[in-house]
Image (cartoon, grey):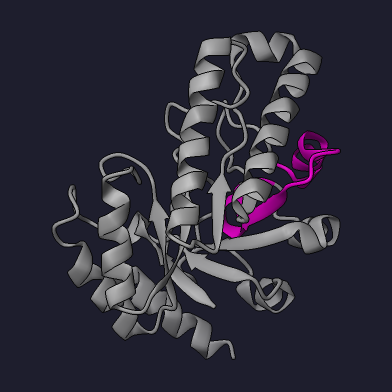
Amino acid sequence: MIGLSMTAYPGRNLLGFEEWVGRAKKLGFDFVEILSEWPHYLTGNSYRLFAEVLDSWGMKRTVHAPFSDVNIGSFNDRLRRISLEIIHETIELAAELDALSVTIHPGHCSPVSVKNRRKYLEIHRKSLRKISEWGLEYGIKIGVENMPRFPILDAQTCERLWEILDDVDIGVTFDVGHLNTTTRNFERFLDLFGDKIVHVHLHDNSGDKDEHLALGDGTVPWVRVLPKLPRVTWALEVNDIESARRSLEFLKSLH
């Protein structure tokens, strides 16, 4: 099952969402990944619009939880509590939408966490265990995503993500494009996480930074990687609908 992320949605509001979903449906996508980020967060008000539009086109859905200004690994109790409240609300609304999965970002680093690595890991895992409990409570799969090359981001390698998730009963969202900016060790990631992978993000880049290009426009070795990906939900995280169309054509050319 392959879907299209709202990274490809151009609107600053949701007035054009129905038309965009229609275009995605006609291209052959099975679901839409709701990206709960500014300027169209998934909220108690907006989820009804998302549900009505997606249902009208017979489209399933996954959800990407907010990540900008959110840090589940923060040493500041109040900031961490608010971050977890935001994640909790997203999981609750995703369940209302009958979403197939929710993707979350791991915590990210700060000057204090860099100096106190053991305590940071303890805080991080405590937050993830709470999120795991919510996933079980609402009956929805949660995937923690590996991060691209960027100074403050954590979990940029499969070994680091494994360390963070140690003893935490939670899934993984495998972002192929992100790993292409770090180790490019795709086989190692797949071997290490195996059945823990509940969702996959597909996009391309030059290997230097997180560009979200159409598949085939960068350096990801798709011929080698695609046959080894688990048969879970795959979401294209590209920048526009034309890149989505070309990416689908690229995928078809490899089969």
Task: Judge by depth and name the residue closer to the eye, 166 or 45.
Answer: 45
Q: Residue furthest left?
A: 15
Residue at x 13% of width, y 57% of height: 15
In this image, 8 relative to 197: left or right?
A: left
Depicted 69 relative to depicted 148: above or below: above
Q: Is residue 40 magenta?
A: no
> Residue 39 versus residue 177: which sits nearer the camera?
39
Residue range highlighted in magenta: 157-182
Q: Nearer the viewer, residue 24 or 85?
A: 85
Position of residue 178 measured from the top left corner of the image (x, y, whole percent) = 58, 50
Location of the N terminus (image quadrant)? bottom right
Query: Is residue 39 shown left or right of residue 130?
Result: left
Q: Position of residue 130 (x, y in %)?
A: 68, 33
State whether residue 132 appears in this view.
Answer: yes
Q: Would residue 177 be counted in the magenta stretch?
A: yes
Left or right? Give the position of 160 relative to 50: right
Q: Image point 44% across, 55% down: which residue?
A: 96
Indicate whether 85 appears above or below 42.
Answer: above
Q: Position of residue 79 (x, y in %)?
A: 50, 16
Question: Hey, which quadrant is residue 81 in on the image?
Answer: top right
Counting the numbered discs, the total is: 0
Q: Residue at x 35, y 46 (%)?
A: 42
Q: In front: 108, or 104?
A: 104
